[in-house]
Amino acid sequence: MKNILFTLSFLLFFFSVKGQSFNILDVPVFQNGAQMTNPWVGGMNAPQWSSFDINNDGRKDLYAFDRNGNVHISFINLGGSPGEINYKYSRHWLKNFPPIHHYVLMRDFNRDGVIDMFSSAFDEFLSGFKVFKGTYENGMLNFEQILFPEYDYDIIPLTSGGDIVGQIEVFNNADYPAIDDIDGDGDLDILTMSQAGDKVRYFKNIALERGYTDDTLIFELGHECFGRFGLTPFSQSLELSSDANMCAFFKNDEIEDKTVHGGTTLCTFDSDGDGDKEILYGDLISPNIIFAKNGGNPDMAWMTEQDTTFPSYNVPVSIPEFAATFFVDVDNDGARDLIASPNLPLFSPDVETAHYYKNIGTDQNPEFSFVQPDFLADNILDFGTGAQPAFTDVNGDGLIDIVVGNREEWAGGTGSSYLSLLLNNGTETEPSFEVVDRDWLGFSQYYPQSKGYAPAFGDIDGDGDEDMLVGDRFGSIHFLENIAGAGQPMDFGAVQLNWKGINVGQYATPFIHDMNGDGLGDLLIGERSGSVNYFPNIGSAGNPEFNPNEEESPNNEFFGKINTQLPGSVLGYSQPAVLDLGGEKYIATGSWQGWLRYYKVDPDSLDSGSFELLDARLGNLREGAITRVAFANINGSDFMDAVVGNDRGGLTLFQSPITIDGLVNDGEILEIKKPASIDIYPNPAKGFINIKLEGFNRSRELSYSIYNSIGQQAMKGVLNEGLYIDVNNLPKGIYFIKIKSGKAGYAGRFYKN
């Protein structure tokens, strides 16, 4: 391989971080011998499905909104031929999608050929619907919220006799309502559950009847009891009415609380081509879907038959707590199919989250046949609920691997918690990962007494190789000593549970780094409350020791005054990751709300005092709730890469806006002067590296620091007159060297064989 010339520049470490971005890396991942098509989606727990043209190419794509973390997910349709299923995940087209909470229904209400958005207003403490009008601008789908100036709030008002009398309410934020042309008059109507949860309310769109255009939304209550059926407490079936003019109310004087159901999902479609709408009903107390057949007509719905385990003629939907259904065309044949997914991310299957039923009938007379429980999800890296990644070189080949801990995975009504190993089988410039073990080191055996695993790697005992700490949901950390030696494949001794008696409360997320410069690995541990605990190593090389009480000296339970809580909340879910950049240390931390916070460490404030918050939303990146981040350079570029986990249980891989010298703004270095270059040779290196300098001030002492690809310092010293460095003892891998001349900093990169 030719020597690699690195042209670098003196940087003033200026940290205005606005405008930076994370760029997704489409690195291949293999599982069970096959390449995954969409590995870096970030997981899916409770997706709500729609089909519409996202990228304005004339083909309907698939869109999912996940309740867990309130995240938009898009799958671009690369097929289009009847029967063809070929979707590619892309976040590019979601740039202009507004922040949404709880539920989304994508409908073209004004019939202009561009999709619009109906969403919950619970984030504004309102129980009604927000509406966003969709338009294409420069090829991108854009949404603008519709205002209702005649009402007190910008949500759909409810009218009666021409007067506004309130709002169309979704009383339970766990509900999923229905929006469809119920009466066949060409505009969209709305179905929601009543406040008592005992019947479905029908809200009729009367804009066209009043002489208004398609882009007007005027609703009145059409009927308090759509379909004339009622809901009996704790029943697995509907109470059908024998009279088309009377609602089937339940009667039980012993039940004082008439709020009989904790959540409901609704989906409507015409099952027999007669013009009226049938309903699919899901309930919090049941894993099944109830199908109710409409024996009435479009103007007067009357449910006369039901299938309580729909589709009983095939494989019934069965999703514990609880199912929602979506009528969308998956395979481009023009006949809409059925997808059933968990409606809430609570004790439901969190990997098999898209039960796909192919429509083998027609769009007018559908017949559903079960295909698979993990549509699209089978090609996504998904570890259930919660994902905490860490970078390290497990097998000693010089390439950076990924270890992932999950909070829990639910399947078949039981849970498990484990570590997963993704080995990097690529090269130093073109990484490629393979999922080789979904219960690495057998941590599932400790479930449920220990779960919610957060792995961290570092040389805690000073013997030159990386040991492992694993935090858990109950606040403890567990230690595994690497006895292999530097540069060798990891070989761990027995797991030492509840190591050193350290416990930080709940959801311990450790990180190993020498914070005080004494040559010993210290501990930073995040926790559920949102603070970061600092445990300096008070032992010696080969004998790490810590005071287990975070409240006692020399520990600091509010390290740098880092806090990831939102005002008024008790949740923070901090997760520190230290970056040593340009002679300064920085801490990035995930958070409960999903943003990455970025702090500059003040070395004089380790015991007390606060660190400067450089950015509360680093790179404006939000991958969902309870985000976890790890940094490394996995491809030899000038940027640190970042793998981000979130509560949906998946991962996303990015090129971060951070270089080994600092931060960049939209891909450009912030300030440059006095160009200088470093030529490092031989590259790759075996025993020594030689350094050729141009443009340096040689009258000053030149000090150097060498860091591995995950930002850990491997060597430091002063350059000798011969400008060479002995790197014989460095393990294989990518390394960064920083050379300082006074206050000026320079950097280069080399590969050690």
Image (tube, rainbow, N blue to C red):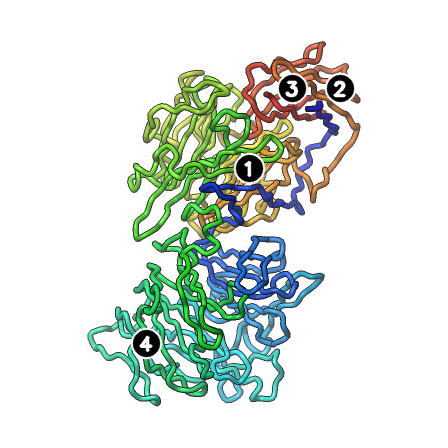
Tell me how far mark 1 sits from mark 2, CA to CA: 34 Å
Indicate which label's residue lies in the foreground, 4 or 3: 4
Q: Residue 282: x and y, percent? A: 36, 68
Secondary structure of the residue carrying tag 2 is strand
Tell me how far mark 4 sits from mark 3, CA to CA: 75 Å
Whether the residues at callouts 4 and 3 have beta carbons within 8 Å, the answer is: no
Disc 2 marks which residue? 693
Disc 3 marks which residue? 704
Q: Could you tell me how many numbered marks the image carries? A: 4
User: Can you see residue 101?
Assistant: yes
Q: Amino acid at mark 4?
A: Gln
Name above or below for residue 358 compared with residue 461.
Answer: below
Quadrant assignment for the C terminus: top right
Tell me how far mark 2 sits from mark 3, CA to CA: 13 Å
Tell me how far mark 4 sits from mark 2, CA to CA: 81 Å
Secondary structure of the residue carrying tag 1 is loop
Q: Amino acid at mark 1?
A: Ser
Disc 4 marks which residue? 306
